[in-house]
Image (cartoon, grey):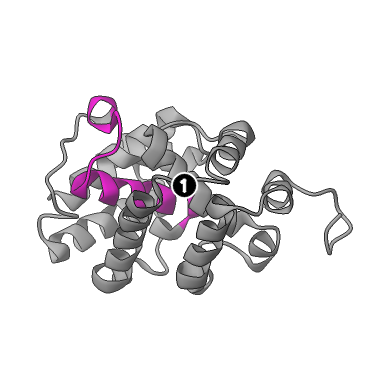
Amino acid sequence: MNAFTLPLNAAEKRHSEFFGRFKDWVNTMLDRYGALLVDWKILTSRQIVRMADAEFIADLALAIEQGIVSTSPAKLLSLYRDNDEAFPTKVELDERISGALDVILRELSGLQGTYMTKPHVFHSLVCALIHCRFGLKGAAEATGIRTIGSYFSDSEKALSSLKRLAAAHEEKDVSEFGEYVNAASEGGNRAAQRAIRVKWLCKALQG
């Protein structure tokens, strides 16, 4: 039971079961970027109390490990279990996720307050940045977008294009970016919708 006298959710169960390296890394990432999730209203206070922030970071780690896949409690549980005693990909995960979040804070802060901060869209944005810079496993095949070795071609053009996508999502305007709007409006963490979102976000980032 938690402070709300409700049954523990999957994220709370994982953090009560494991005390190893992966959990420590997730907590370290939240120490560094938890304020971003709060200040940008990506997650609500209640969601954070119930450890949605930890699940968000773990879900990004899953994307780096497995590519654009659907999330499930079983997959996230395996991440915690498999990396509890030894965590061989820690440096890689840290570099990719920290790099993407830092560039959002540094170069794309104009997205704050837009529909780009919906949690499922923000997850796809981080994945798109990582794919543009480093590549995500299987993402080129799933999206048709190649890795360019940088987060974007031009920061101002990328920000402008991302704002256009966010506005289309907010207004449910399917006239120009219908595929993206539909995938963004459906929400969720399914692979098919994620691949569409990442494709269009990469297009925006790459100009």
Q: Which one is nearer the viewer's eye here, 200 or 36?
A: 36
Magenta stretch, overall SS: helix
Mark 1 residue element:
loop
Q: What residue sits 43% from the left and 59% below the top?
A: 117
Task: Using the rendered image of the protein, determine whether residue 36 is visible from the camera's viewpoint.
Answer: no
Task: Using the rendered image of the protein, determine whether residue 84 is visible from the camera's viewpoint.
Answer: yes
Q: What type is the residue that disc 1 sits on?
A: Phe
41 lies above or below 184: below
Q: Which one is nearer the viewer's eye here, 105 or 61?
A: 61
Instruction: List the residue tagged with mark 1.
Output: 87
Residue 145, image x and y in percent?
A: 19, 35
Q: Which residues are magenta?
A: 118-142
Q: What residue sits 61% from the left and 64% below the top?
A: 44
Query: Quick one: label 1, few (<14), some, or many (20+) residues within 10 Å?
Result: some
Q: What residue sits 84% from the left and 64% below the top?
A: 3
Q: Is 151 on the left or on the right of 65, as rendered?
A: left
Residue 167, image x and y in percent?
A: 34, 56
